[in-house]
Image (cartoon, grey):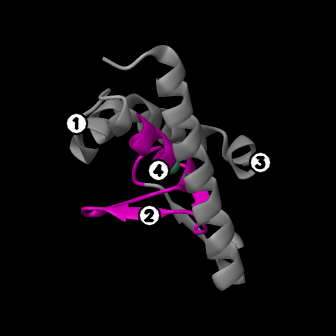
Amino acid sequence: MENKEKLLEKVESIRQSVEFMKKQDMEENPESAYEEFQCDCCGEIKIFAGSLPYDSFRLCNDCVLLAETGFALGKMKDIEDLMEKMEDKRFESLYKSIFNPDENSMN
Ligand SMILES: [Zn+2]
């Protein structure tokens, strides 16, 4: 059984590597900082940099962090599990994009 400090260390190292991945993407392909796509997980429009494919889904950098942290901490077992947990969030994003288009474009 891991203690809390070790877990925090683990989360921090995941956060750093996910952030590094985004930076690397921007360096290798500067356009990825401007190109946008709709994240399959949170449903928001995000930039390509730092995004990753998981099975048939493409996750934004924020969701990659969420996924990797969740897996590492045993909060979810696989990507399907995460997609299920994010269902409400996706719905909320969709709702906002339909009824508050201005607010959505602020992101
Ligand atoms: Zn996302």
Tell me if residue 99 comes above or below residue 107 in the rendering.
above
- Residue in the image at 77% along x and 48% along y: 106
Check disc 1 and give the amino acid type: Lys
Question: Marks 2 and 1: CB-CB under 8 Å?
Answer: no
Q: Nearer the viewer, mark 2 or mark 3?
A: 2
The answer to whether one can see residue 43 in this image is no
Tell me if residue 20 comes above or below residue 82 in the rendering.
below
Residue corresponding to mark 1: 77
Task: Classify 10 Å Cα crowding around label 2: few (below 14), some (14-19), many (20 and above).
Answer: some
Comes first in the chain, label 1 or label 4:
4
- Residue in the image at 49% along x and 25% along y: 6
Comes first in the chain, label 1 or label 3:
1
Q: Element type at marker 1?
A: loop
Question: Marks 1 and 3: CB-CB under 8 Å?
Answer: no
Q: Looking at the rendering, which quadrant does residue 49 occupy?
A: bottom right
- Residue in the image at 67% along x and 47% along y: 101
Residue corresponding to mark 4: 64
Q: Nearer the viewer, residue 75 or 90?
A: 75
Side of 73 where 65 appears, left or right:
right
CA gap, disc 2 to disc 3?
A: 23 Å
The location of residue 20, given as percent across then percent down, is 63, 60
Q: Element type at marker 3?
A: loop
* Mark 3 within 8 Å of ligand 1, using the beta carbon: no
Residue corresponding to mark 3: 106
Side of 57 where 32 appears, left or right:
right
CA gap, disc 4 to disc 3?
A: 22 Å
- Residue in the image at 40% along x and 29% along y: 88
Question: Marks 4 and 2: CB-CB under 8 Å?
Answer: yes
Which range is magenta?
40-69
Q: Is residue 12 magenta?
A: no
Residue corresponding to mark 2: 52
